[in-house]
Image (cartoon, helix red, strand yellow):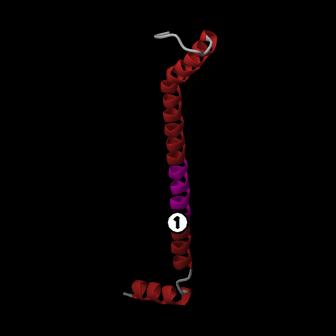
Amino acid sequence: MAFPTSVNNQITDSVTQANLEVLGSSPAMALANLYQATAQALANSAHNSTTSQQQNNITAQAATVMGVTTLYSIDTATTGEATSKIFSV
């Protein structure tokens, strides 16, 4: 102690040790919070990437279905008439 006080020395030492424990554990807790925030950000990024890929696959499948539907919806009579004109030349 720097100077004598009216408080018991054991109490003063206990409070001092508690304060030093808080100061000593602060860097570790700050680093743990940083790691946790970084892990959360990376997990969100991976989730967003997966969701985006799924949505792109759904869009591509819908476009393919519409293309096939368009091909199948061409009138067969028109196709037959065009084919007969091609072969009659």
Q: Residues within 10 Å of mark 1 (few under 14, many from 20)?
A: few
Q: Nearer the viewer, residue 60 or 21?
A: 21
Hey, which residue is sitting farthest left in the picture?
Answer: 89
The answer to if 28 sits in the magenta stretch is no
The residue lying at 48 percent from left, 11 percent from top is 3
- Majority SS type along the magenta span: helix
Position of residue 50 in the picture relative to residue 82 (left or right):
right
Residue 59 magenta? yes
- Return the x and y of residue 81 as percentages of the image width and height: 48, 90
The amino acid marked with disc number 1 is Thr
Check the image and report above or below for 30 versus 40: above
Compared with 58, 66 (above or below) is: below
Q: Position of residue 6 (x, y in %)?
A: 58, 15
**Image point (48%, 34%), residue name:** 34
Name the residue located 62 percent from the left edge and 12 percent from the top edge.
Answer: 8
Residue 42 percent across, percent down from the top left: 50, 41
The one of 45 and 52 positioned closer to us in this rendering: 45
| Element type where label 1 sits in the image | helix
Residue in the image at 54% along x and 74% along y: 66
Q: Which residue is mark 1?
A: 59
Q: Does residue 35 lie above or below 47 as drawn?
A: above
Residue sitting nearer the eye, 41 or 50:
41
In the image: residue 31, left or right of residue 9: left
Q: Residue furthest front?
A: 6
Residue extent of the magenta highlight: 47-61
Q: Quadrant of the C terminus?
A: bottom left
